[in-house]
Amino acid sequence: MPNELSYSALRQQKIESQSRFYAHLYASRDNGSFEVDKRSISSNLINKKNLPKLSIKSVPVFD
């Protein structure tokens, strides 16, 4: 059945892709070149002045 063969091939591709992704992720984390961390640290979104000021409308009392 072609669907069964293509499913197993896709499943194998997914497993290989995930293993490559995690291998790269762990290697970059260990050698300090993890790009996502560097981008998030230098992001302007972390600056509290740039965050939206939202008012609290009503907080329910659960006591």
Image (tube, rainbow, N blue to C red):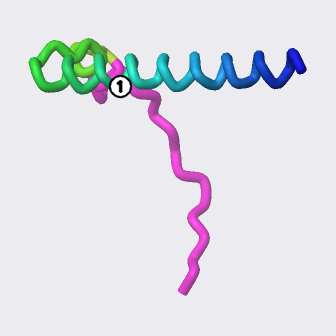
Residue at 64 percent of width and 25 percent of height? 11
| Residue 33 location (% of width, % of height) | 16, 13
| Residue 44 location, quadrant | top left
Specify the farthest residue to the right: 1
Residue at 40 percent of width and 27 percent of height? 51
Mark 1 Cα shell of 10 Å, populated few (<14), some (14-19), many (≥20) = few
Q: Is residue 35 left or right of residue 20?
A: left
Q: In which quarter of the image is the N terminus?
A: top right
Q: Nearer the viewer, residue 11 or 18?
A: 11
Q: Is the magenta stretch mostly helix, strand or loop?
A: loop
| Residue 58 location, quadrant | bottom right
Q: Dot 1 corresponds to which residue?
A: 22
Specify the farthest residue to the bottom: 63
Residue at 29 percent of width and 17 percent of height? 24
| Residue 26 covered by magenta stretch | no
| Residue 46 location (% of width, % of height) | 30, 25
Residue at 57 percent of width and 77 percent of height? 61
| Image position of 53 with respect to 17: above or below | below
The magenta span reads: 45-63
